[in-house]
Image (spheres, rainbow, N blue to C red):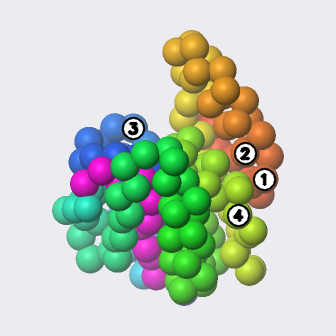
Amino acid sequence: MPRVAQVISIEGTKRGGAVNVMLALVEEGRERGWSQIVLNPFATNPRGLADHCDGIRYETLTPHSVAAFPRARRWLRHHLRQFEPDLVHVHLVHAGVTVASMRRPLGAVTLFTHQHSRHLLDRGRRFAAFVDRVAVRRFDRVVACSESV
């Protein structure tokens, strides 16, 4: 049975495209009997998406600022080591950069589902777009969700 860690960086409880994709994958994994965990190291609400992850272990860290990045990184590394995933599936920029900055969990494949490439540039977030481009190179596979990505 595969062990899948879904890592997402969503602040509150809002369900946008990335959250919906992740939750659909979690549901499919549940139906297939996969062992799963959802990790959200950048939550502003400790409950976050817990209500949507029925029956799946959901863990959050509420760092409250970008300055808390080292803490989020340590927290995520600890949970990934403990869970020992076969696949680390990452969603959204902050989660992507965090996972990319870490040593790959032993034996795990890393996958980044990318939603924002042009969006960051279009919003004038050039540094975020640059860091994002560098981070995606550290993943085994990248899935682009649109033509612009």
The answer to whether residue 19 is above or below residue 55 is above
- Check disc 4 and report its element: helix, strand or loop: loop
Residue under the image location 55 percent in, 54 percent down: 69
Question: Looking at the image, which is closer to me, 1 or 36?
Answer: 36
- Give the distance between the C-alpha atoms of the residues marked 4 and 3, in whole angstroms: 26 Å
Q: Are marks 4 and 2 in contact (CB under 8 Å)?
A: no
Whether residue 92 appears in this view of the structure is yes
Residue 17, label in figure: 3
Q: Is residue 2 something that shows in the picture?
A: no
Whether pointer 4 and pointer 1 mark residues with C-beta atoms closer than 8 Å, the reply is no
Q: Are marks 4 and 3 in contact (CB under 8 Å)?
A: no
**Mark 4 vs 2, N-terminal side:** 4
User: Which quadrant: the N terminus?
Assistant: bottom right
Q: What's the magenta region?
A: 35-45
The amino acid on which the numbered mark 3 sits, given as a three-letter code, is Gly
Is tag 2's residue or tag 3's residue first in the polypeptide sequence?
3
Measure how far apart labels 4 and 1 are at the Cα level.
Answer: 9 Å
User: Residue under circle 4?
Assistant: 102
Asked which secondary structure carries label 3, the reply is: helix
Give the image quarter of residue 118: top right
Image height of 120 relative to 27, above or below: above
Q: Is residue 3 left or right of residue 38?
A: right
Amino acid tagged 4: Met
